[in-house]
Image: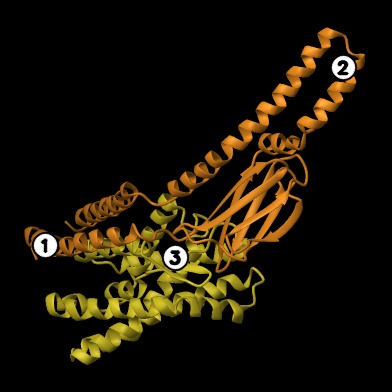
Chain colours: A yellow, B orange
Amino acid sequence: MHISEGVLSAPVLAAGVILTAAGVSLGLRNMEYEEIPEVAVLTSAFFVASLIHVPVGPSSIHLVLNGLLGLLLGWPAFPAIFVGLALQALLFQYGGLTSLGVNTFNMAFAAVVSFYLFRILTRKSTRFMLIFSGFLCGVVGILGAAFSVALSLVTTGEAFLTVAKLIVVAHLPVMVIEGVITATAVVSLNKVRPELLERRTRI
Amino acid sequence: MNPAGRLSYIGGISVKALKIFLITSIIMVSISTIALAHKVNLFAYAEDGVVYTESYFSDGRKVVNSMIEVFDAKNDTLLLTGKTDNNGEFSFRIPQATGLRIVLTASMGHKNEYLLSEDEVREASSGGKPSVKALTESAKEEKKEAASENLTQVYDRELETIVEQVIEKKTAPIMKKLTKIEEQMQKPSLQEILGGVGYILGLMGIGIYFRYKSKH
């Protein structure tokens, strides 16, 4: 998921920076005073999640949790993922500072998409609906991010379909794991703190 | 809502959330010691006119069948390309005695490089120096002509070569171990992970500070 430094061309990097800047400012404007601790806690979870690894075929994949972040945060997922990725780049050299914009957009955009797709479902609090939508939310987060990564790699000359297939197939196990984790989180949050699931968009 | 009410609300949310977070992060960190990191590492060393490279994902798995490109470090001309084998290794004869920039491109946007300094390459490429046998032979020839004072010089050279070869043989395992250690140093440490979490909490504090000021 983390695209390394020196892989992408300058126009792609610039586009990533611009889109991420827009997303981050939207997210900050949408973040209420009371939500700041929640955003920080989920940022930390995102930051640590990338350290959990699932070896698959020729590559190695890890948890992303962007579906969960998107569902719980909405647009503030942008600043959260931005901070998480910036720290990962600085401390562990995952991705890189120049590709930070593109990487943030790839993961955060999918997060916001899964927010819009599943926020209605999670309000219908039948247990089955919660589990079902939570699972799909985790899956869509990864699927969307994989799609964006493939799209940004097209410009490096790799054929889109091949890369997209490779990335999606490689992330199938993670999709399932993320789905399970997101579903579990949604169900338990619904019990403990149902108000966290009732985020309204203010855009 | 009055300021005190707001604060206690935040206190309520963060204490509970922090508890949950701390427990999860402890579990995550303990899992993560088994398998870590998500980037590729590339290490290279030169010996006896050959450059050896090893590539790993930083959870320790080998990077198999991925492209390696070797560039001249100064003018960036492509010297040669190759693919890593099933052990993530790739070796090649030193093409020229300049600094070498070795670039590994793994799948899905993973990339890393290793710079082999000019000194290191030069030293290794002169490793194709005459063997002891050849030296002795040339010494024999020289012996015939050389005056006796030159003889000690020749023996010195012979001795030097022998010593160098022995040292090289003895240090090879150490070099391998060093590469391993270097690889391990790339893994995220607990301090770094906790440091990162600390940064996030600090940012949260800054955010709360500014929002609080602007609201009241």
- Asked whether the residues under marks 2 and 1 belong to the same chain, the reply is yes
Q: Position of residue B80 (x, y in %)?
A: 75, 55
- Which comes sooner in the sequence, label 2 or label 1? 1
Q: In this view of the protein, which residue sits in the foreground, B142 or B118?
A: B142
Q: Answer above or below: position of B153 versus B130.
A: above
Mark 2 Cα shell of 10 Å, populated few (<14), some (14-19), many (≥20): some
Q: Report the amino acid beneath label 1.
A: Arg
Instruction: Answer whether residue A135 is visible to the viewer in this image.
Output: yes
Is there CB contact under 8 Å for labels 3 and 1? no
Q: Position of residue A71 (x, y in %)?
A: 30, 77
Identify the disc placed on residue B143: 2
Where is residue A111, by image quadrant? bottom left
| Quarter placement of the C terminus of chain A | bottom left
Identify the disc placed on residue B6: 1
Q: Answer above or below: position of B152 versus B101.
A: above
Judged from the image, the secondary structure of the residue bearing numbered disc 3 is helix
Q: Cα distance, mark 2 to mark 3?
A: 72 Å
* Subunit bearing disc 3: A
Position of residue B173 in the picture relative to residue B14 (left or right) = right
